[in-house]
Amino acid sequence: MSVDLDILGIGLSAPGLSDWECFQSVLNGKTIDIDSKAKPSTLLSARERRRAPAAVKLTFPAAEQACAMAGIDPADPLAVFSSGMGDLDITNYMCRTLADQPELLSPTRFHNSVHNAASGYWSIGAGARGDVTAISAWRDSATLGLLEGITRTETDALTHSAPVLVVIYDDHAIGPMHDLWPSDSAFCAALLLAPPNRGETMARLTIELCQDQPRHAPLPASLAARIDDNPAARIIPLLALIADPARGDLVLGAEQGPALKIRRSSTGSAIGTEQ
Amino acid sequence: MNHPLNVSAMTLTCSAGSGLDQVRQSLRQKRSGLRANDLEPCTLTTWIGRVDGVEAARLPIALADYDCRNNRLVELALQNDHFIEKVQALTRRYQSERIACVVGTSTAGISCTEEAYRNLGDATRFKSEFLLPRVHTPHTSSAFAAKRLGLDGPVMTISTACSSSAKVFAAAARLIDAGLADAAVVGGVDSLCQSVMYGFHSLELVSDQPCRPFDQNRRGLSLGEAAGFAILEREPDHSFGQLAGWGESSDAHHMASPHPEGHGAVAAMREALSRAQVSAGDVGYINCHGTATAMNDQVEAHAIRQVFERPPPAASTKAWTGHTLGAAGIAEAVFSLLALVDEQLPAGLNIDQLDDACSDFVLTEDMEQRVDYVLSNSFGFGGSNCSLIFARA
């Protein structure tokens, strides 16, 4: 059984991959400039940005870019935040403090330690009152985040009119957690999904579950290195397919459970925005 | 039209009992699972819903790299109520690739991460016995449960604090409705750890007595641990009840406090009614979130009143179990389904004087009554709300 959906917007937040334009130029062979950082969130004030947890600083720019590209109010979409490890900075703080001086644990940092802190702040910052959820699938979080987003575009008659924002992210490792999550570069990508024909689409995708091994057309070495470094970046082959329909089908894998076979399909009209 | 989704098997392990029979006995005998805090190294004066035997539980040797308190609790739970055998029978009816596994948790393996840091000393790297990458992730217990049960469909963790394992029912139903799975094992698990003990203490939300949901003089919550699982499928031989509807919403208000008017809670309950295609008057009982914090119980009572002109009998079961956080959704789904099947509506526990906000509908004595629909509320940090409606099968 396959599902069709449209991509209405994309955002990125990662060192050297700071937005969709930047990603496309790297895909086309430009050297990554790691000093290029995503423009900070405009949903948060300067003061809120300084106090925000790392996961919020990482995810908001990408999520905001995806909504802006589609011309959609960030309050409107349902949202799925998917991360294998969540906020590693706060995990490090919590565990160090609990080991040394548990009575001094900060109440603010405690409530920011929940896995749904980034999604919770997104709901607050964007004013989103629909469902905003937080999932994890360890190194499979890109695939399962997309899958959870797909089911929301497909089945839900009550919420069918809302697009679905899928935010896939993982931070670089901090302190002793590096041995368990050996990642050096944070990565976040946001995709705004919708059922077919709900808005101006960047790409129409046909997606089905399969048991195939992961595969995709070759990528520039700099992007392949990001995929090896941070499992959230395993979404990059899909971003590349959206940028370049000539790349052909791909299989987004999962180490546990089925993979997703994804191909570009015709939008059936001339509203595509590929140049 | 699709057949409704049925809960064809379920199990619960919490401080009030290990398996459905013990849980039922505790409900009937009004025997709370709470005890004075004895969770080392935590020295706080409070009461906890600790499950006996977690430390002694052992995972199968082949899955030793998942060993942590959360997954030992999962193992204990799966051993009860013939749940493993029932999943084995399920895998004979459906291909294992077509059975999803969706588990909610908030603590996951963090007690092991805490222990690794406690043993760090001046070193910059964990001791080798703590180098368990499959444990130190929010996803640990879904991954473990799927391996333990031999499920090869999509494996997903929902971690939205205290609504986590209510939302698993919605996520699994979406996978099945989209044709991406034929059946699902859903569940929830959270285990006691220093993070939640000192964390809720830092927010001044923990009572120094056993919690008293909806009592006028409630002083905060008691923390607990639990693991529960259920099988969702369309046409089973036996059913505890049907998943009639669900509602999910966000407060868009504050990370740790509910919206003062209960906007998100109201939206979740209304969406659940709408999806179930029933009116508020059809609901015969509400298993409340009812944490016994000053704020939650007041806002929840206010929200229920906005949805129900005349609220049905309602209660919180958290005085039996403690607030089991990421496992609260599945635990209270089980309590709700037992109320449907046993035709017995549990009252609250530890109530001397009901809060005026809910004195006309929160039960202080159990009711023997057959009801057709039960609503279960779960609300979490981040303003994450989920309401479930179960129908008599």
Image (cartoon, rainbow, N blue to C red):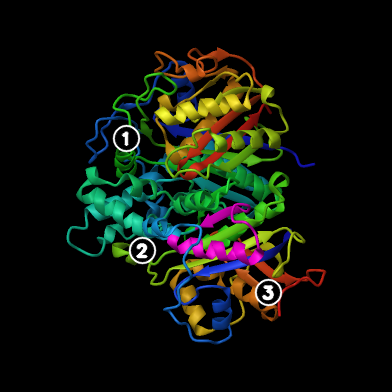
Q: Do labels 3 and 2 share a chain?
A: yes
Quadrant that contains the N terminus of chain B: top right
User: Residue B298 shows which numbered tag?
Assistant: none
User: Residue A180 shows which numbered tag?
Assistant: 2
Is disc 3 placed on a helix, strand or loop? loop
Residue at (63%, 64%) from the top-left corner?
A: A260
Q: Do labels 3 and 1 share a chain?
A: no
* Residue topped by disc 1: B204
Residue B252 picture location, percent across and down: 52, 45
Task: In the rendered view, tell whether residue A23 sits above or below residue B204.
Answer: below
Q: Are marks 1 and 2 on the same chain?
A: no
Earlier-in-chain disc, 3 versus 2:
2
Q: How far apart are marks 3 and 2 (CA)?
A: 32 Å
A23 left or right, relative to A157: left
Is disc 1 placed on a helix, strand or loop? loop
B202 left or right, relative to B146: left
Identify the magenta region. A57-82
Q: How far apart are marks 1 and 2 (CA)?
A: 33 Å
Q: Which amino acid does label 3 sit on?
A: Asp
Residue at (71%, 64%) from the top-left corner?
A: A6
Q: How far apart are marks 3 and 1 (CA)?
A: 54 Å
* Few, some or many residues within 10 Å of mark 3 (<14, 14–19, 20+): many
Q: What residue type is labelled 1?
A: Glu
Q: Callout 1: residue from which chain?
A: B
- Identify the residue at the far front of this view: A46
* Residue topped by disc 3: A249
**Quick check: can you spot residue B290?**
no
